[in-house]
Amino acid sequence: MAKRIGSLKILENKRLNKEYFTLELSGSQRIPEMKPGQFAQVKVEGSPETFLRRPISIHFINPERNSIKFLIQIAGKGTETLSKLKKDDYIDIIYPLGNSFSLPSKGQRPLLAGGGCGIAPLLFMAGYLKNNGFKPDILLGFRNKERVIEYDEYIKFGNVFLTTEDGSMGEKGFLTDHSVLKSANYDIVYCCGPDPMMKAVASLCRARDINCEVSLENLMGCGIGACLCCVVDTARGNLCTCTDGPVFNIKELKW
Ligand SMILES: Cc1cc2nc3c(=O)[nH]c(=O)nc-3n(C[C@H](O)[C@H](O)[C@H](O)COP(=O)(O)OP(=O)(O)OC[C@H]3O[C@@H](n4cnc5c(N)ncnc54)[C@H](O)[C@@H]3O)c2cc1C
Ligand code: FES
């Protein structure tokens, strides 16, 4: 898949709550083909402290609008600067980077499981599954009701199940406590979120012999395989999260 570097125009910067916002971008050229799980390296302009690009997953592609969407959590200076961009501003990105989630085999039952900004690549994946004839279950974990975002987007592509840590919406507890994980028989789980959550999902899948792919959010420098700061120890040796991942089958990871 050819990579592009260039400026895209912001069609919309939508604030979802105190922490999260979405950026929808488009350009004069046709947006290239991308797969769910891939990401972009986003340049943060006018901020000397953040000269390294920030890796952000492709959240959604809208072919009719020729647009790419990012879902971003304000984590520090870089993402905060991005949150202040306005409609018609330009943003410089390198994309699409990394590998992608695989498709299930015909007739298999997929579950998407995500928490925090890890829910970002799962909307694209949910749409991709639907376009390929699957109706996934989608399990999303949040801290509380006020932090639940984009429910109306995910529900377009599958059955959505929620957990909140305080029980203010959906089932109470962590994502891995949800009854759907215990009762339903899935063939494959696609997971993205904080490391402890992904490790817990991976151990549950291992115990029940369920295939599982996780998208790692390791710290990155270059995003293109040059600096080796994103290396992960796997059954195939040291691999770069940015070029060999970010998606890994749990069979490959030494978790
Ligand atoms: C492949 C990949 C895809 C990602 N997709 C998304 C996405 O779709 N939406 C989103 O909001 N975030 C995503 N992230 C995380 C995002 O890149 C970081 O939150 C961002 O780089 C932080 O930049 P900052 O300048 O705002 O914060 P910094 O000041 O650089 O850091 C603030 C805090 O965030 C932590 N942090 C920095 N980089 C990362 C990282 N890569 N992963 C986790 N924590 C980090 C730092 O340790 C620090 O505690 C992704 C990361 C990777 C590797
Ligand atoms: S981020 Fe530089 S090699 Fe992966």
Image (cartoon, helix red, strand yellow):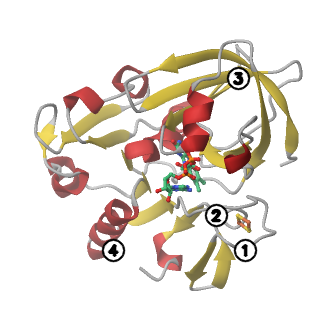
Say which residue label 4 marks.
206
Other residues around mark 3 within 10 Å, as few (<14) / some (14–19) / many (≥20): many
- Res 137 → quadrant: top left
- On residue 81, the disc is none
Nearer to the camera, 7 or 63? 7
User: Is the residue under label 1 in contact with that under label 3 (CB below 8 Å)?
Assistant: no
Nearer to the camera, 161 or 43? 43
Say which residue label 1 marks.
228
Amino acid type, mark 3: Leu
Nearer to the camera, 191 or 54? 54
Amino acid type, mark 1: Leu
**Ligand 1 contact, mark 4 (Cβ < 8 Å):** no
- The single residue placed furthest to the front in the displayed view is 48
Amino acid type, mark 2: Gly
- Picture coordinates of residue 21, whole percent (x, y): 49, 27
User: Is the residue under label 4 in contact with that under label 2 (CB below 8 Å)?
Assistant: no
- Picture coordinates of residue 96, whole percent (x, y): 75, 45
- Picture coordinates of residue 24, whole percent (x, y): 64, 22
**Ligand 1 contact, mark 2 (Cβ < 8 Å):** yes
Q: Earlier in the sequence, mark 1 or mark 4?
A: 4
Secondary structure at badge 1 equals loop
Say which residue label 2 marks.
245
**Ligand 2 contact, mark 1 (Cβ < 8 Å):** yes
**Ligand 1 contact, mark 3 (Cβ < 8 Å):** no
- Res 70 → quadrant: top right
Other residues around mark 2 within 10 Å, as few (<14) / some (14–19) / many (≥20): many
**Foreground label between 3 and 4:** 3
Q: Is residue 53 above or below residue 137?
A: below
Nearer to the camera, 79 or 194? 79
- On residue 25, the disc is 3
Q: CA distance from mark 2 to mark 4?
A: 20 Å
